[in-house]
Amino acid sequence: MYCTNCGAEMPDDALFCTACGEKIDHEGEAAVGPEESGYNGKTKKWARKRKETSGAPKSPKKGIKIALIAAAGIAVCGLAAGAVLLNQPKAVIARGVKNTWKAMCTEESGVAEYLGLRQISRMVDTGKSRRKAELSVSVGPQDMGIGLADVGLSGWLEKDDKGKMLGRVSGTMGELEIAGLDFYHDNEKTVAGSPELYSKYFYVDHQELKEKLEDSKVRKMLKDEFGIEWDGELEDERLDLIAEYWDVSRENWIALMKNMSVEKIDKRTFTVGGKDKACQGYELTIDRDDIRQVLEDMDDVMLNNSMLVNAAAEASWTSPEDMKRQLKEISKRLLGALKNDLVLQVYVGPKGRIVCVEGDYTLNGDVITMSLGGSLELTGKKNPLDTVYLEAEGKVASMAAAKLTFSRELNDSGNMIKDKVDLGLSATGAGMFNVSAKAEANASLNKEKGRWNAEASLTLPGVQGSASANGTVGDLAKGKQFVVTLDDASVGAYGLSMPFVGITASYGVEPLKEEIVDPTEDVKLVNVLKLTRDDLNEIGSEIGDNAGSGGFVLPGVGSKSVPAATTAPYTEAPETTAYDSGY
């Protein structure tokens, strides 16, 4: 008999083909010769015939193998094609922008990482958290032990995921206790009051307030009595403006990426994260018409928004119509000066991030000619902003020139964090002026000792100033709590300085385990929106009496205490065991 798979001759009782290993089905088919099997002995080619079998068909193992091989081939081809597409210059740039922006927004480093500020932020953003903070400030010559104005402030705030907030703020001034403020907020109302000063709490119903503010008489009263100009649609207009700017910006960015041309250029070496890295360069060319379109779209958003136009008109002491006309004229001149394409050199480094952008541009207008140029390097190891260098120059024909430089370098080497920032500005004007300014700031934190130090200096024409401060970081539980003290600080000019302030600040946060319950059911409430002048006079009188007695307390001076019944049941912070920072 012959194998039905490869046509090889084999014994009649064979269970498997001796040539290809195919299993022989002796029940489903009789032994066949080479002609019947479909094998052509002359051409040595195989033309397989469909077999007639009884019962259930055989499992198509060979077909599955072929299908898997074909799928694998397609996948390999797809990956290869995808790799080619992803490595296209334009795709590399788009991905580089995304990677760089993501790292800038999410990578934590330096003091922020040391304190765990992003972890704290995430806990707060979940909506269910309890925060507690204290701040004390002493102003005066600290080295003499005299505080001219010692102020203390402490408070706690709870917030749940349903929009409810509950909290209290209280403070001291010198040896004088300042009355505290309790507050509660939910989707329906806001309640606030000081139990030490007044026996009732004030509340505002949100729906009632909205209806009041829609009344033109109420808005006129607010303007005449308190100088408050209220536009009920203002917040919605702001949100609409932000949304419109976002949509326009996104559409313009997509169009720019689609239309610009990108070509590879030579590599350049940059120091990224302390190591020299060869970074691939790309040259981007953005058509001037696309730039014009972006500016025109932004102008349309601004000119069609009455809030922006009115604000600009008020700031310029002119009418909205005149302001709109002036803005259109400025826009027309700017667009008319855009006569060249914008060419940028972009370098992509480790992790697919953009490490450098540089280029220049010339505006050729009918009125004025201006050239702009600069470069930006983002070469931090974790966060691109850890190491920054910016240089920008501008020239207005031969009349004036200005140069701006900015640099920042963060170095976190185990037990020590160092952060240095420099800013420089110079300007010249056709022999008429030549000025320069310089600012420097240095900060360091010794993690092992918990000591920090900061210094800053400013140099302006005819003025030199400096400031310094130092203190400690303690009670640290990363992402939960910390206490920062400012032990000594001073400012000075021309070499003279004097210590003047001392600060202690503490902060703690923990998850909120239970939902906030409205605590105002048993509290006497006063509707702010229904107060009369007589009510205000009565309230002022009671507050005045309590402020002179129980509201403010001087040690050693007899005073009347506020009755316990006037204190709201939620003025004390709930007990917590999640953290113990000592404050």
Image (tube, rainbow, N blue to C red):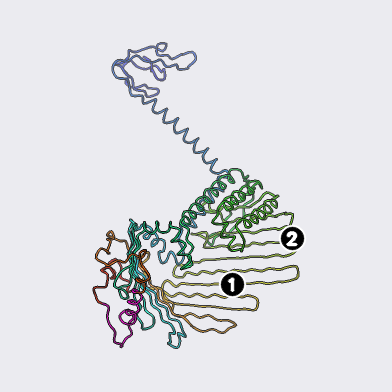
Residue 7 forms part of the magenta stretch: no
Pointer 2: what residue? 397
Among the two numbered marks 1 and 2 on one chain, the one whose residue lies closer to the N terminus: 2
| Image coordinates for residue 35, horizontal then vertical, percent | 42, 11
Does residue 28 lie above or below 117 as drawn? Answer: above
Q: Quadrant of residue 197?
A: bottom left
Q: Nearer the viewer, mark 1 or mark 2?
A: 2
Pointer 1: what residue? 439
| Image coordinates for residue 165, horizontal then vertical, percent | 34, 62
Q: Residues within 10 Å of mark 2 (few under 14, many from 20)?
A: few
Q: Nearer the viewer, residue 327 or 422?
A: 327
**Is residue 449 visible to the viewer in this orientation of the structure?**
no
Residue type (three-letter) at the residue carrying disc 1: Ala
Does residue 9 lie above or below 136 as drawn? Answer: above
Q: Are marks 1 and 2 in contact (CB under 8 Å)?
A: no
Q: Residue at x 52, y 63 (%)?
A: 386
Q: Nearer the viewer, residue 262 or 224?
A: 224
**Count of numbered labels shown in the rendering:** 2
**Is residue 557 visible to the viewer in this orientation of the structure?**
yes
| Image coordinates for residue 400, horizontal then vertical, percent | 72, 65
| Image coordinates for residue 258, horizontal then vertical, percent | 58, 43
Boundaries of the magenta span? 538-562
Q: Quadrant of residue 257?
A: top right
